[in-house]
Image (tube, rainbow, N blue to C red):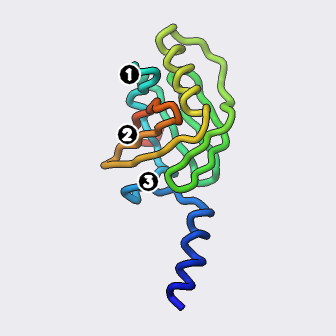
Amino acid sequence: MTLTAAAVLVPLMLACGSSQGAETGQPVTGVDWRVDSLTADGTTRHAPAAARIRIGTDGLAAGNLGCNQFSARATVRGDRITIGNLRTTKMACDQERMDFERALARTLTTGTLTARVDDGKLTLTDGDGDRVHLSHSAPE
């Protein structure tokens, strides 16, 4: 009986998704994350102070890309996160912030991200190996 219940419940739990980190069980959703840096195309860039992300338990992601505010649909299944097309404000900032913003937006939306939470830090890795490094942030 126990084996039958496990055979039915485990695939169901995996199909429904989870907002927990893959290895640690720490939450990914419902947390305000500060973007610390982005490693894309072999180059690491430090994030502007404004860069933030929150993946809500309601299927929405929102935050700041470094200059502009954004919102998007987000799907979380285990350690896999997919963020849809970003809706952003249209402010202009200095070239360095705009370059960071474009690279972050591209990394977040080019496919499924793999999430790893460890000791209050979140790393999102895309299919090309580009990584967004985040840490817990106080709510704005």
Farthest left residue in view: 119
Q: Mark 2 falls on what kind of element?
A: strand
Cα separation, mark 1 vs mark 3, equals 23 Å
Residue under numbered circle 2: 135
Q: Nearer the viewer, residue 7 or 118?
A: 7
Residue under numbered circle 3: 21
* x and y percentages locating residue 35 in the rendered image: 43, 32
* x and y percentages locating residue 58 in the rendered image: 63, 53
Q: Are marks 1 and 3 in contact (CB under 8 Å)?
A: no
The answer to whether residue 68 shows anywhere in this view is: yes
Inspect the image, locate mark 1, and give the three-letter code of the amino acid beneath it: Thr
* x and y percentages locating residue 100 in the rendered image: 49, 19
> Which quadrant is the N terminus positioned in?
bottom right
Farthest bottom residue in view: 1
Quarter of image, res 134: top left
Q: Are marks 2 and 1 in contact (CB under 8 Å)?
A: no
- Which residue does the image show at 40% across and 43% down from the upper left? 122
* x and y percentages locating residue 30 in the rendered image: 51, 51
Q: Mark 3 falls on what kind of element?
A: loop
Numbered disc in front, either 3 or 2? 3
Residue under numbered circle 1: 44
Inspect the image, locate mark 2, and give the three-letter code of the amino acid beneath it: Ser
- Which residue does the image show at 41% across and 40% down from the upper left? 123
Quarter of image, res 9: bottom right
Inspect the image, locate mark 3, and give the three-letter code of the amino acid beneath it: Gly
Few, some or many residues within 10 Å of mark 3 (<14, 14–19, 20+): many
Q: Mark 1 falls on what kind of element?
A: strand
* Total numbered badges shown on the rendered structure: 3
Quarter of image, res 62: top right
